[in-house]
Image (cartoon, rainbow, N blue to C red):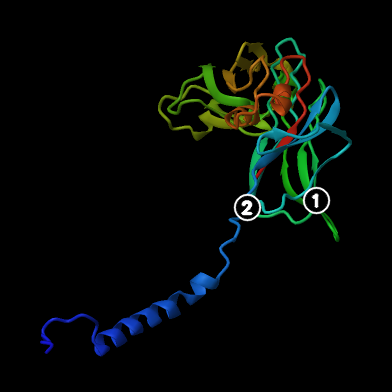
Amino acid sequence: MININKNNKLAFSLFETIVVMGIVAIFVTVCANVFTKKRNRIVEKFPHGRFECYYSGGTLKQQYFIENMPKALETVSVCKFKPIKNAAYYIVNIVGGGGAGSNATNGYGGSAGEYGSFFITSIEKELEIIPGKGAPVGGTAEASVVKSIESTGEKTIASVNGGVYGFNKANISGDSISDCNVTNAKYICTRHPVCRTYTSYVQISYCNEDDMTGTNPAAYITENYNYSNIKNKLVQNNNILTYEETSNKKFKISMTINTNMTVNADMSEFTPYLKTLGVEDGIVTVSPGDGGAKGQPGNNGGAVIIW
């Protein structure tokens, strides 16, 4: 006779089995889409590189660098940039042609071309890049322009101006002067003599006669002197120009030339930018946009597009 102990369980009860099967069914239902979905999705990679456009030896060059690997260097009449597939953005960097240095006895170097950086989210059409040429001595520097070639015509998307001709007395303007002072006055009155510079003239306020009581308002007068009329009477000594009113020598003024006007070439902001990108050859070697030293032409402009 077999003795069965009902407290000794050898298997799941029917209720327990149903619960386990229910849990498994829920798990399979939830994971069905995961198990059947293809797992071969490719993660999209954004490309990186740069495009250079510059003059070398008088000829226009263009070159692509894809993931820092250089492609063929091309000689072209106009630089043309084709949009890069899947590029997340573009940064267009351009610099105008440099101004020439003055060949006057007391002449200064020309200023660098204007530098500009333009952030563009997308480029749909081919771009045409025209770097401005540097100014010959006595000439004018050209602007640099980037155009989009649309079906309806050309559309300018970026442009910067060329540099300015080196300073000399023949082309003096208020932009050339950083400071102006009355260094000597013949008469004394209750107000101090004042010198101010404007674009086309210098303004002098001074005492026309002695008046220490301040009772004669006509004793203090203001006059404007056009640069074109006084430039031949200016005496230049390094960075200082002096002018003396010859009519009874009523006053003498000194004007300080802007300190950024040097005999040497003015370096463009574009060159240090290229060096921060790690550019060591190609466009950086021609120093695009730099101003010319005294009596020398300015450097041609250039462009770099990165993505």
**Outermost residue toward the front in this view:** 1
Q: Quadrant of residue 262?
A: top right
Measure the C-alpha gap from mark 2 to mark 1. Answer: 17 Å
Residue underneath mark 1: 126
Q: Which mark is residue 88?
A: 2
Residue at horizontal 78%, vertical 27%?
A: 134
Q: Nearer the viewer, mark 2 or mark 1?
A: 2
Q: Residue 119 location in percent, x, y?
A: 63, 48
Q: Residue 78 location in percent, x, y?
A: 86, 39
Q: Amino acid at mark 1?
A: Glu
From what the image shows, is residue 31 above or below residue 6? above
From what the image shows, is residue 168 above or below residue 133? above
From what the image shows, is residue 233 above or below residue 268? above
Secondary structure beneath dot 1 equals: loop
Q: Answer left or right for 151 relative to 184.
A: right
Q: Amino acid at mark 2?
A: Ala
Q: Residue 93 location in percent, x, y?
A: 67, 39
From what the image shows, is residue 266 above or below residue 95? above
Quadrant containing the C terminus in the rendered view = top right
Dot 2, crowdedness within 10 Å: few (<14), some or many (≥20)? Answer: some
Residue at horizontal 43%, vertical 30%?
A: 214
Q: Quadrant of residue 275?
A: top right
Q: Answer left or right for 236 relative to 125.
A: left
Secondary structure beneath dot 2 equals: loop
